[in-house]
Image (cartoon, helix red, strand yellow):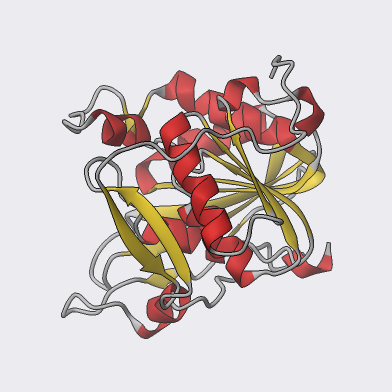
Amino acid sequence: MTSDKTPSGTDIADVPMMQVTHDHLLNETVKITQPSDGYRVGSDAVLLAASVGTITGRVLDMGAGVGGVCLCLARRLAELQITAVEKNADMAALCNEKAVKNGLQNRIRVLSADIREMPPVLAGSFDHVISNPPYHNSHGTRPRHPDRAVAHMGDETLMRDWVKAAVWAAKPRGRITFICRSDRVPELINLFAGAGAGETVLYPLWPRHSSPAGRVIIQVRRDVDGPGAILPGMVLHRDDGGFSDAAQDVMNGGPLHVSHPARPQQAD
C-alpha cells in the first residue's frame, strides 16, 4: 500500500473495444456489461453483495471486476458509499461505465489499482471490506482463458496479500467479508487471525441438500478477538437444478443475514 495515487476522482479510461454481453442481475434492476469470454459474473457476486448488512458508511469492494458485487450492493442499500478497486484497467472501465448507466456514479468510485498498492489515504477508512478473491490453488488446472485464470487462481502468498489488504483498509472493529471455496476456509481463518482479525463467522452455501458445502462466506472483524459462530447457511438449488426459494429471494435482491448472532451488522 505504498502508491502515491489519491482517490480524488475516478481515473478510468474509456470502455475498451471487446466482445461483450449485456446482462442483468437482481431481477433486472442492475445492468452489467462483461466480456463474452473469460471470467463471468455469477451467483457468488450476488451472494456476497447480499451478505452486507451495514446500512450506512463506506464499503470497499476489492477485486471488483466488471462491478457485479458493488452494483448489486449499491442497488440494495441506498446510503452506502462504495469504492471499487480493480487491477485490470479494461474491467475497471466496464465497472465505471455501468455505475453511470445504473445511475450509481455518485455512490460508486472506481479505482484501477493493484490491491497491494492502494492509495494510503484508504488505510483504516472502511466500515466493511468485501471481496471474491482468487480462491483456487495455483497448482491446480488453470482455465485456458487468461482473464478467467487470473480471477480464479491464487496461491497462498496471493491469498495472504488479499487478507492483508482487507485488514489494512478496514476501520478498527470494521467488518471484512470474503466468499471462498470451502476447502480454503481453514487457511483463511489462520490468515485473518495472523493479520489481527477475528470473531469469525462462517455461512456455508450448499449446492443441494445432499451435497457438501462448496462455497462459504467468511466474515471477520478487525482488532476483535472473540468467539466465532457457524450460521445455518443456505441450500442454493432444488433437485431439479433451479434456485431454492431462499436463494431465489437473494437473486431478486433480498439479504443474507451474515453476522455474529450477538452482534448484528446494523447495530454497529
Task: Work out whether residue 119 or residue 186 is closer to the camera in this orientation and state it.
Answer: 119
Residue under the point 28% across and 74% down? 237
Q: Position of residue 49 (x, y in %)?
A: 54, 60
Check the image and report above or below for 11 versus 258. Answer: above
Residue under the point 34% across and 63% down? 23
Q: Position of residue 30 (x, y in %)?
A: 47, 68
Question: Is residue 10 visible in this depiction of the protein?
Answer: yes
Q: Horizontal placement of 60 versus 72: left or right?
A: right
Residue under the point 81% across and 40% down? 125
Q: Which residue appears farthest toward the bottom when viewing the image? A: 245
Residue under the point 32% across and 37% down? 17
Q: Position of residue 139 (x, y in %)?
A: 25, 22
Question: Is residue 196 visible in this depiction of the protein?
Answer: no
Q: Position of residue 126 (x, y in %)?
A: 76, 44
Q: Horizontal placement of 257 versus 4: left or right?
A: left
Check the image and report above or below for 232 versus 184. Answer: below
Q: Quadrant of residue 256?
A: bottom right
Task: Work out whether residue 222 or residue 128 is closer to the camera in this orientation and state it.
Answer: 128
Q: Horizontal placement of 26 versus 71: left or right?
A: left
- Total numbered circles: 0
* Quadrant location, the N terminus: top right
* Quadrant location, the C terminus: bottom right
Q: Quadrant of residue 15?
A: top left
